Amino acid sequence: MERSNGRPRVYADANIPTGVVAYMRATLGWDVLFVLEHDELRRARDIEHYRLARQLGRTLITLDHDYLDDRGFPPAEGAGVMVFSAPDERWLRRLVRKMDRQLFRAEGARALPLERRKAEWHIGGLDDNDDDAGG
């Protein structure tokens, strides 16, 4: 799966704040499919989002810990899932930026760095010297 013009391709589900989606696009340059911008996706079930992200070759980004259930969302059937835990948008932007650096922009990074895998990142996983992601 190729990146769109070298840009990371992600599928942001409905619980990702609009401001964070704007940060992904404007600051990080990601190609983001945002569920809330598509009426036909707003009421879709989680499994439908999971399958569509795979079909479209996009890493699913969410705050919904249900996606960590391997029985309901088998890793082998996914394009990759990143579940974030953050108290507010400022911290969430920091986690997103960390994902950008460590997964999408790292030397030798693949277009789908979490393909067939899942990860959960939370604020305790940030370095103390990480700056504030523009917020």
Image: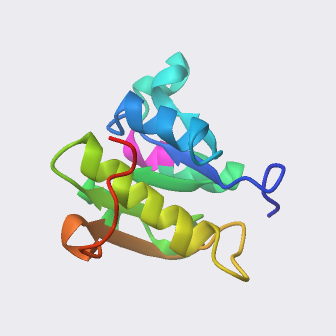
- Whether residue 108 sits left or right of residue 120 in the image: it is right
Q: Which of 25 and 72 is in front in this view?
A: 25
Residue 20, quarter of picture: top left
Q: Quadrant of the N terminus?
A: bottom right
Q: Please, is residue 131 above or below residue 27 in the view?
A: below
Residue 95: x percent and y percent?
36, 60
Q: Which residue is drawn at 43% across and 72% down?
A: 118
Q: Give the range drawn in magenta.
A: 45-49
What residue appears at the point 64 percent right and 69 percent down from the top-left corner?
Answer: 105
Tell me where residue 3 appears, x and y as whole percent.
78, 57
Residue 114 can be seen, yes or no: no
By what rule are the colours in the image chosen? rainbow
Residue at the outermost bottom position: 108
Query: In which quarter of the view is residue 32 placed?
Result: top right
In this view, the residue farthest toward the top is 39
Tell me if 125 is positioned left or right of 59 in this view. left
> Which of 108 and 111 lies nearest the eye of the viewer?
108
Q: Taking 67 as reference, is 79 left or right? A: right
Decide: is 112 above or below 92.
below
Q: Is residue 80 magenta?
A: no
Task: Please name the residue shown 59% across and 38% down the image.
Answer: 25
- Between 127 and 106, the residue placed more toward the observer is 127
> x%, y% of residue 73?
41, 64
Q: In which quarter of the image is the C terminus?
A: top left
**Residue 26 visible, this angle:** yes
The answer to whether residue 48 is magenta is: yes
- Residue 121, given in percent of the width and then of the height, sits at 31, 68
20 is higher (above) or lower (below) than 2: above
For residue 93, side relative to residue 81 (left or right): left
> Compared to 18, does 13 lie above or below?
below
